Image (spheres, rainbow, N blue to C red):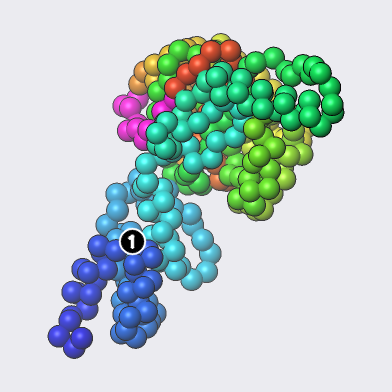
Amino acid sequence: MKTLTDDAVLHIASFFDTVDMLNFAQTCRRFGRRQQADLSLVEQGARQLIDSAPTYEKNWLPHKKGRTIWIEVYHELLKLRAPPSFDLILGSGINHVNKNKYHVYVSLREQYEEQQLQQAKLLIRRKRSHYILPSSVVSCVGIGNHIMSHGKHFVKFTMTRVEKISFGIIRPFDEYWVDENGDSCKNGFSPFESWSDMIDATSSRRKYWGASNVHCCLYKAYPGSCQWTDWETTQTIDDWYGMEHALDGDVGLLLDLDVGTLSVYKNRRRLGIIKDGLSGEYCWLMSIQGASNSTAVQIKRGYIPDL
């Protein structure tokens, strides 16, 4: 170990993810013990990787008070670098395509089969010969894997033609709520219907919301309006300057948390700012409510088009 210079250790650490860094730090006191500037060699490696990141990536990172734990900050950067995906899907008729979480397929077939199963259960439970379920329409959401709180974030949604689809942002959900309530959402799910459930689903991260009361905001692909809510007293559908519909093709969203705005792009053409006054943590959101035809939707990271 004496022949392994600090520079060599830092170079080795640059190839690790955060789990490997922590394991590497535990293999030898020299690697994990605080040294220069009260940092261990592994923490110095994590800091160097952050310092070498592009400015727009560094602007993604939260500004935390107190001592900076650089491995933790690097872990946040790696999560935001990961390709966007619909890690969480809730509601009826929605599934990942071939286990690819960036790609979902929404179909009335899955909705119909789920309704038939629920109908059979109700007939057995209530000993009825006939039971009428709600009309066969899709009600579902796909929620993104990135938790965004700072900087600029651009994403592109690609879809086949579908009615009643929306794209936007929502507060991050608590894992425990999803574990306890995920099955109850299979008959349909909308972030605008049960405000008390939404508050419960996101409450543990409320301290990271900032001053904004915009907790869910959607661009409705038709007719192009903005729907948003604070989950307490307000739910509105607003027209906005530059408003256009987008029934197929690409819809791009730019979340700029440096200034607190959400902008919409249609096939890489900027339409305008759909909402301002945003702050705190958000995830990407795709929502289909009441559609009667099938569709496929992909989410991909995009580069911010030239203005």
The quarter holding residue 76 reads bottom left
Q: Residue furthest bottom?
A: 2
Magenta residues span: 297-307
The percent position of residue 56, horizontal first and vertical second, equals 35, 45
Give the SS element for disc 1. loop
Taking depth in this image into account, of 65 and 249 the one nearest to the observer is 249
Residue shown at the point (66%, 23%) measured from the top left = 115
**Magenta highlight on residue 213:** no
Give left or right: position of 162 versus 21: right
Asked whether residue 214 is in view, the answer is: no
Q: Residue at x 27, y 68 (%)?
A: 13
Residue 298 versus residue 23 in the image, above or below: above
Q: Is residue 229 left or right of residue 244?
A: right
Could you say where residue 106 lies in the image, as x and y percent from the top left? 51, 23
Counting the numbered discs, the total is 1
Residue 16 is at least partly visible in this image: yes
Is 291 placed above or below 146 here? above
How many residues crowd around disc 1 within 10 Å: few (fewer than 14), some, or many (20 or more)?
some
User: At x 32% / y 33%, what residue is drawn?
Assistant: 303
Please provide percent x and percent y for residue 108: 56, 18
Q: Residue at x 63, y 17 (%)?
A: 137
Residue 280 falls left or right of residue 81: right
Rendered image quadrant of residue 93: top right
Q: Amino acid at mark 1?
A: Asp
Q: Nearer the viewer, residue 126 or 15?
A: 126
Judging by the rendered image, the residue that carries numbered circle 1 is 17
Horizontal side, residue 89 vs residue 130: left or right: left
Quadrant position of the C terminus in the picture: top left
Q: Which of the image's four quarters has the N terminus? A: bottom left
Along the line of sight, the residue nearer the viewer: 153 or 159: 159
- What x and y, as percent, mark residue 276? 56, 31
